[in-house]
Image: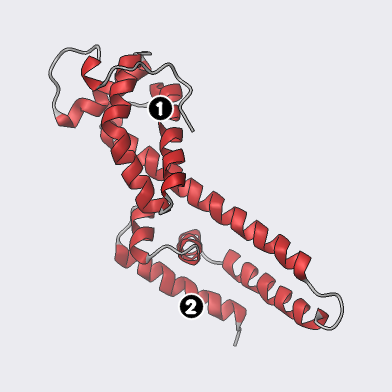
Amino acid sequence: MSIAVPVPMARASRTTRSRTTTATDRATELLEGVAAGDQWAFAALYDEYSPRVLGLAVRILIDRSIAEEVTQDVFLELWQNANRFNAAKGGGTGYLLTLARHRSIDRVRAEQSSRDRDERIGHREAMPEFDNTLESIEQLERHQLVERALATLPAVQREAITLSYAGHTHTEIAAMLGVPLGTIKTRLRDGMSRLRSGVHPA
């Protein structure tokens, strides 16, 4: 996937801004240039920050090919909507990485939703029509019971459990959601306790 913008072939050294900038405000300056339609600023921003965006996406998504797609999406959005950046609310680097984290988490949720949908379709297609009908009905009822119990959980617990079932470690989930590891463990423990109570009521 490639970004459909007229990015020049020049590297970051060709940016039109000539004054020396510090590392802390470099991304801010470049984003302001992109917002003004400066293609050289966009080329420099991509050259200098795409490795960091890709690294963050890989840590969240695990799959590098999907992470590369997300990275391209992030920079496409920056090119199209750079005027949304407001330096008064924070630095450019933080803005860039926050956008990358949000897009990565959105992709995790989309991938999980797609897998869940495929599993439901596969389950319906595989249901036996004769000897195993009763067993299939019981399994379907249990699945529906789990779904109902999951829906009753607070959003933060439901989100942590969903990401855990998607195969992510506690550390990865903490990084994805931007909260302490201990908080994630507490959400998972409390959420699973409530989930078991909902599936196996006393």
The residue sitting at the bottom extreme is 202
Is the C-beta separation of discs 1 and 2 under 8 Å?
Answer: no
Residue 155 in picture, x, y percent from top left = 50, 59
Q: For mark 1, does the 10 Å Cα neighbourhood hold few (<14), some (14 to 19), or many (20 or more) residues?
A: many
Earlier along the polypeptide chain: callout 1 or callout 2? 1
Picture disc at residue 18: none
Answer above or below: position of 100 versus 164. Answer: above
Q: Residue at x 47, y 71 (%)?
A: 191
Q: Is residue 25 above or below residue 194?
A: above
Residue identified by numbered label 2: 193
Q: Which residue: 32% across, 45% down?
A: 55
Q: Residue lying farthest right?
A: 130
Q: Is residue 143 visible?
A: yes
Under circle 2, the secondary element is helix
Q: CA–CA distance between discs 1 and 2?
A: 42 Å
Q: Residue, x 58% and y 67% (percent of image)? A: 150
Residue 117, image quadrant: bottom right
Front: mark 1 or 2: 1
User: What percent of the width, then of the height, locates residue 156?
Assistant: 46, 60
How is the model colour-coded?
secondary structure
x and y, in percent, of residue 189 in the image: 42, 74
Q: Secondary structure at mark 1?
A: helix
On the question of residue 90 being in view, the answer is no
Instruction: Where is residue 118? Give x, y as percent.
Output: 66, 58
Q: Residues within 10 Å of mark 2 (few under 14, many from 20)?
A: few
Q: Residue at x 39, y 38 (%)?
A: 99
Mark 1, residue position: 78
Q: Kindly identify the amino acid type of the residue bearing the numbered disc 1.
A: Leu
With respect to residue 66, does 171 lie above or below? below
